[in-house]
């Protein structure tokens, strides 16, 4: 399921924020994480929604940190949308990489 249509550069983050608001739950909290890989650093993101941490699926170059946030937001949005009829139901999420 795609996020709501808009021209924002952060459509998944915006849709996640809107869905949390509609469900009257706390706003998503994003965290940026890094992993030193040789002479470079890879960046990713995770987001906490309704007490559940959702990790981005991929690692990104530092200039693309917003893509990492979009990735994590997409994962959380899809989880929340599937669980929106009962957000307290148990679910599984991806563990840290």
Image: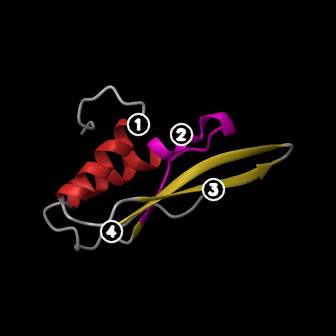
**Residue where numbered disc 2 is placed:** 66
Sequence-wise, which precedes: disc 2 or disc 3? 3
Secondary structure under badge 4? loop
Name which quarter of the figure residue 84 lies in. bottom left
The structure residue drawn at horizontal position 40% and vertical position 48%, both measured from the top left corner, is 73
Q: CA distance from mark 4 to mark 3?
A: 20 Å
Q: CA distance from mark 1 to mark 2?
A: 8 Å
Compute the Cα span from label 2 to label 3: 12 Å
Rendered view: 9 above or below 78:
above
Residue span colored magenta: 53-70
Q: Secondary structure at mark 3?
A: strand
* Residue that badge 4 annotates: 50
Residue 38: give x, y in percent of width and height.
85, 46
Q: Are marks 2 and 3 in contact (CB under 8 Å)?
A: no
Task: Give the residue at mark 3.
Answer: 33
**In this rendering, which labeled residue sits more in front, label 1 or label 3?**
1
Label 2 neighbour load within 10 Å: few <14, some 14-19, many 20+: some
């Amino acid at each position: 399921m795609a996020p709501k249509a808009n021209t924002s550069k952060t459509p998944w983050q915006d849709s996640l924020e809107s869905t949390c608001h509609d469900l009257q739950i706390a706003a998503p909290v994003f965290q940026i994480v890094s992993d030193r890989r040789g002479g470079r650093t890879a960046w990713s993101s995770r987001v906490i929604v309704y007490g559940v941490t959702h990790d981005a699926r991929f690692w990104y170059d530092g200039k693309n940190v917003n893509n990492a946030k979009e990735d994590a937001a997409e994962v959380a949005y899809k989880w929340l949308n599937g669980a929106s009829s009962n957000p307290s139901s148990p679910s599984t999420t991806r563990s840290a990489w």
